[in-house]
Image: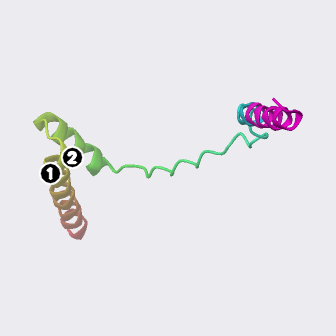
Amino acid sequence: MTLSSRAVAAAFACLLLASTALAQTAPAAAPATTAAPKKAEKPRSAESIECSKQADEKGLHGKERKTFRSDCLKEAKAAAGAAKSK
């Protein structure tokens, strides 16, 4: 093996070792709060909670539950509107 081929082989080995060593280093100090802030939850109305309880009692899930709760909330709002107008 000639001197130049040894130099090329050594340089190639150094590049391979350096790339794996650099890949294993920890990233620069990142801010502790990189996660997106959670969306603030709206307070639930008494009607919404009651409709959820009714859906739980009926064992509804998925689309059926969503439809039931939607109808229940519409009825509750209509009843509250009728009570206010009296």
Identify the residue at image location x=20%, y=51%. Answer: 66
Which label belongs to residue 77? none
Q: Nearer the viewer, residue 39 or 13?
A: 13
Q: Which residues are magenta?
A: 1-17
Q: Nearer the viewer, residue 79 or 68?
A: 68
Q: Mark 1 = which residue?
A: 68
Q: As shown in the figure, which amino acid type bears the numbered disc 2? A: Cys
> What is the x, y in percent for residue 10?
82, 32
Q: Nearer the viewer, residue 37 or 73?
A: 37
Identify the residue at image location x=53%, y=47%. Answer: 38
Left or right for 77, reference 13:
left
> What is the x, y in percent for residue 52?
23, 43
Which label belongs to residue 51? 2
Of marks 1 and 2, which one's residue comes earlier in the chain?
2
**Residue 60 forms part of the magenta stretch:** no
Helix, strand or loop for disc 1:
helix
Residue 86: quadrant of the picture: bottom left
The correct choice, above or below, for 3 with respect to 74 in the image is above
Q: Are marks 1 and 2 in contact (CB under 8 Å)?
A: yes
> What is the x, y in percent for residue 20?
71, 32
> What is the x, y in percent for residue 82?
18, 66
Tell me if mark 2 has few (under 14), some (14-19) or many (20+) residues whose alpha carbon lies within 10 angstroms of its own: many
Q: As shown in the figure, which amino acid type bears the numbered disc 1? A: Phe
The correct choice, above or below, for 73 with respect to 3 in the image is below
